[in-house]
Amino acid sequence: MKKCQEWQIEILKEVTEGLKQNHYYVTKNRTKLVAFYPEGDKDAFVIYKKPKNFSTRYRKFEVIASGLNAL
């Protein structure tokens, strides 16, 4: 039987000072970017087929939502 891998999905809002817009990011374990939503453009929501590397270094985020998923 295949063992389930657990991972944490979080929706983050960037709140780094000095930015004109604060974008939203859907991440997997805060290391992979699964989806992106630019603030103020409802039609620009992007879901990536293959998760991209994601770094929170030098930036500040507010957690909008989080949940545990299993594969």
Image (spheres, grey):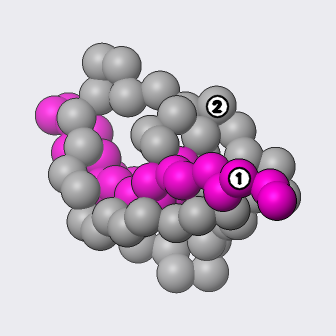
Q: Secondary structure at mark 1?
A: loop
The magenta span reads 1-28
In depth, the one of 37 and 47 nearer the eye is: 47
Give the residue displayed 80% in from the left and 56% down from the top. 2
Q: Which mark is residue 53?
A: 2
32 above or below 1?
A: above
67 relative to 71 in the view: left or right: left
Give the amino acid at mark 1.
Lys
- Please, which residue is most extreme toward the bottom here? 42
Q: Nearer the viewer, mark 1 or mark 2?
A: 1
- 38 on left or right of 12: right
Quote the CA–CA distance across marks 1 and 2. 24 Å
Based on the displayed image, in which of its 4 quarters is residue 16 positioned? Answer: top left
Please state which amino acid type lies under the numbered disc 2: Asn
Other residues around mark 1 within 10 Å, as few (<14) / some (14–19) / many (≥20): few
Seen in the picture, residue 31 relative to 64 is either above or below; the reply is above
**Mark 1, residue position:** 3
Q: Which of marks 2 and 1 precedes in the sequence?
A: 1
Q: Quadrant of the C terminus?
A: bottom right
Along the line of sight, the residue nearer the viewer: 55 or 10 = 10
Instruction: Find the residue positioned furthest to the top.
Output: 58
Camera-nearest residue between 62 and 43: 62
Quadrant where the N terminus is found in the figure? bottom right
- Residue 65 percent coordinates (x, y): 29, 68
Can residue 20 be seen here? no
Left or right for 20, reference 26: left
Magenta-colored stretch includes residue 47: no
